[in-house]
Image (cartoon, rainbow, N blue to C red):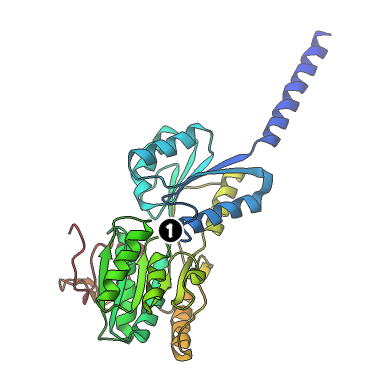
């Protein structure tokens, strides 16, 4: 009789354990630097989150915190998610690297993922997209389309990710138009439509007729349209905000990465590492080419195809910085280490990198 009771208890424990396991959902957290309605960077990350929900259904539960500031606020937000039972947390901006690295040490059983950074640990990966590839195509278009030979760039913060894209934009333009110059204004924020618009307005007043940006709202592109000049969308297709001005846009497709990494957590196969997504994986996309002649469209497509099939590399030497120092030898292709630590302007850009 005693043996029967023990057997019943054991079976009951097994049943409830299995039931609990079956009912458990993988908890997925996202830390955003801007609002989900920025129609740019954070908007596209949140599309990725939504695609995770669509793909896994009731197997996952996602949550997010938007407009999280760098520093102590980021650390608190990441730690709160980990304490709340998150199985994997994605922090989607460069400035979250150190806070995430610190919190990751405190929660060895949680998986951490940091966007656009370069540090990893046993339970923290880094990931990014080669958005400079699309930016180079934009530069080629700008060089062919400019009437004033003055293109411009609204930058958020002087970090390698942004410096790299300024350089590739300029190199693209210079490759088809040796007379082109570039103006750069730093706004020291990822998302502030007022500041972004004002920066674009100032450069347009100084003769810029091709507006590019590395900030998160459509404001610079909308400012371009109001001024009767042209520009490029950032992170998502912003055509609806400036249908007469947008030439194309970089579209960040984070969904495949997020789905793959969440699948790894579910399967128990998640591994740390560094991911740098390529245009040939369809994670770096471009909006349709609009508001341009057919010959420009055809040439831009040729460059895009070359990048996609691996026959064209934007950062191929010889490349000097704007102090005359050789950065890449003749025929040398920049490796990821070089790209992810790029803190110099290329030759021809008449400006200094802030803080250098």
Q: Is residue 315 visible?
A: no
Screen quadrant of the C terminus: bottom left
Q: Which type of secondary structure does the marked residue at label 1 adopt?
A: strand
Identify residue for label 1: 128
Q: Quadrant of residue 85?
A: top right
Q: Quadrant of residue 318?
A: bottom left
Q: Position of residue 221 (x, y in %)?
A: 40, 70
Q: Along the line of sight, which residue is nearer the eye, 24 or 5?
A: 24
Q: Quadrant of residue 106?
A: top left
Query: For the point 65% across and 36% down, which residue is it?
Result: 24
Query: For the point 60% across and 55% down, which residue is it?
Result: 51
Q: Along the line of sight, which residue is nearer the eye, 112 or 35?
A: 35
| Left or right side of 7 for 60 | left
Q: Is residue 341 above or below residue 309?
A: above
Residue sticking out furthest to the front: 226
Q: Is residue 32 above or below residue 196?
A: above
Q: Position of residue 203 (x, y in %)?
A: 27, 72
Query: For the point 15% across and 71% down, which residue is it?
Result: 323
Q: Position of residue 125 (x, y in %)?
A: 44, 48
Residue sticking out furthest to the right: 1
Screen quadrant of the N terminus: top right
């Amino acid at each position: 009789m005693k043996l029967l009771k023990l057997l019943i208890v054991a079976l009951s424990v097994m049943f409830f354990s299995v039931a609990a396991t079956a009912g458990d959902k993988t908890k997925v957290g996202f830390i955003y630097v801007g609002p989900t309605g920025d129609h740019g960077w954070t908007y596209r990350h949140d599309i990725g989150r939504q695609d995770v929900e669509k793909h896994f259904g009731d197997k996952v539960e996602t949550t997010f915190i938007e407009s999280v500031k760098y520093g102590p606020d980021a650390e608190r937000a990441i730690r709160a998610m980990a304490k709340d039972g998150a199985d994997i947390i994605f922090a989607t901006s460069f400035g979250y690297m150190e806070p995430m690295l610190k919190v990751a040490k405190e929660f060895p059983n949680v998986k951490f993922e940091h966007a656009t950074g370069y540090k990893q640990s046993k339970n923290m990966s880094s990931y990014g997209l080669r958005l400079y590839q699309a930016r180079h195509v934009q530069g080629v278009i700008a060089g062919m389309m400019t009437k004033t030979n003055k293109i411009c760039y609204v930058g958020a913060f002087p970090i390698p990710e942004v410096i790299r894209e300024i350089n590739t934009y300029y190199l693209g333009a210079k490759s088809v138009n040796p007379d082109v110059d570039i103006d750069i204004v730093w706004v020291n924020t990822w998302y502030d439509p007022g500041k972004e618009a004002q920066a674009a307005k100032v450069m347009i007043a100084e003769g810029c007729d091709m507006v590019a940006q590395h900030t998160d709202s459509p404001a610079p592109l909308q400012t371009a349209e109001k001024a009767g000049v042209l520009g490029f969308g950032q992170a998502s297709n912003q055509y609806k905000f400036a249908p007469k001005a947008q030439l194309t846009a970089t579209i960040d497709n984070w969904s495949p990465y997020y789905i793959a990494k969440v699948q790894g957590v579910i399967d128990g196969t998640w591994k740390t590492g560094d991911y740098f997504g390529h245009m040939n994986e369809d994670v770096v996309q471009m909006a349709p080419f609009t508001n341009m002649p057919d010959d420009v469209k055809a040439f831009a497509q040729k460059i895009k195809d070359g990048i996609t099939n691996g026959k064209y590399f934007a950062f191929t030497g010889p490349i000097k910085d704007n102090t005359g120092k050789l950065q890449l030898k003749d025929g040398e292709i920049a490796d990821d280490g070089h790209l992810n630590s790029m803190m110099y302007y290329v030759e021809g850009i008449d400006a200094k990198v802030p803080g250098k």
